[in-house]
Image (cartoon, rainbow, N blue to C red):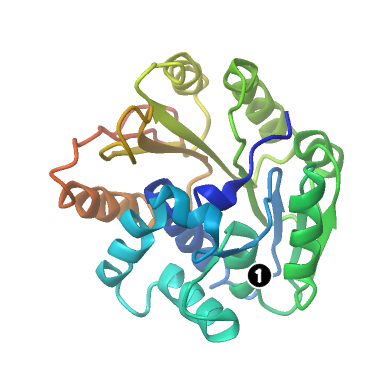
Amino acid sequence: MLSYQHLYHAGNMADVHKHALLAQALDYLGQKPKPITYFETHAGRGLYDLSAPEAARTGEAARGIERMLPMFPAGHPYARAIARTRALHGPKSYPGSPLIAALLQRPGDLAHLAELHPQEYAALEEAMQPYAAICHPRDGIAFALSKCPPEPRRGMLLIDPSYEGKEDYEAMPHHLYHLHRKWNVGVLMLWYPILTSGVHAEMVKVLDACNFPGALRHEVGFAPARPGHGMVGSGVFVVNTPYGLEKEAERLGAMFRKLDKAPARRSRTVSRAGKSRG
């Protein structure tokens, strides 16, 4: 399906959760003097205008990044990426995950960004022109599978589907398994929504049962964006979790719990041997 456009939801609370963890992981990978490859399977447009009518219509950014940004220290890689974006594009701009990755890139790093939606792809190409990123108007999962393992071999892949259909939930554990088989050293991050319908629950159960190495599952809860809205939380599942990301997840969990007395959600961390650490 190609109806989803993230501009309506850019900078919402799920973005804060997902993008803060993404930035922290990329920052850690960038500390070693070795180049990395970054993949995205559902890249979106890369750069968002939070003053656009679509964003203003939902008000999700006002409840999300505009409220939560002051809670991040200035040196946090997520805060740095936002500050740089706003210096370049204005105070109401917001970086999507491709731009966050690009702003944390170093010489020698490479990025491949896949996006099928024609309008989103055109905007992505324009946003990424100044950076060392290659945009692909292709199915992102199929593209990643065809390119893994990449060169440079160190790196990270973000899977961030729209979950417009139930089939996405059913397919993601299968895709993650095969991507890990092909790229066993890659950091693989899957984002998913926490929904009142519970449609995500079976996918999470399957992911937990797969015994991926160095797996981290972290979820945060928050109040719905508006009455009747079904998303009440955000989750990430990470394979080959980088050092320090578990600590960052715990810090983010505490941050979310301070907001609106948001319901705490349990996180589950699995050791590299596949045994639960709590």
Task: Compare residues 86 and 272 and report the one nearer the observer.
Answer: 86
Image quadrant in which you'd find residue 194: top left
**For the residue marked with disc 1, what is the amino acid?**
Ala
In the rendered view, tell whether residue 80 sits above or below residue 226.
below
Judge from the rendering whether residue 117 lies leftward or rightward of residue 16; answer left or right. right
Task: Compare residues 58 and 127 and report the one nearer the observer.
Answer: 58
Q: Residues within 10 Å of mark 1 (few under 14, many from 20)?
A: many
Q: Quadrant of the N terminus?
A: top right
Q: Residue at x 57, y 52 (%)?
A: 7
In the rendered view, tell whether residue 73 sits above or below residue 269.
below
Q: Residue at x 53, y 57 (%)?
A: 53
Residue 32 coordinates in the image, percent (x, y): 58, 72
Judge from the rendering whether residue 265 lies leftward or rightward of residue 33; answer left or right. left
Residue 152 visible: no
Image quadrant in which you'd find residue 49: bottom right
Residue 272 visible: yes
Residue 119 coordinates in the image, percent (x, y): 78, 51
Task: Compare residues 276 and 172 and report the one nearer the observer.
Answer: 172
Q: Residue at x 64, y 16 (%)?
A: 167
For the image, the number of numbered tags is 1
* Element class at badge 1: helix
Residue 27 coordinates in the image, percent (x, y): 51, 68
Image quadrant in which you'd find residue 228: top left
In the rendered view, tell whether residue 250 sits above or below residue 169.
below
Task: Compare residues 178 and 102 and report the one nearer the observer.
Answer: 102
In the rendered view, tell whether residue 196 sits above or below residue 246.
above
Seen from this angle, which residue lies furthest bottom?
87
Judge from the rendering whether residue 22 lies leftward or rightward of residue 218; answer left or right. right
Q: Quadrant of the C terminus?
A: top left
* Residue position marked by numbered label 1 in the rendering: 102
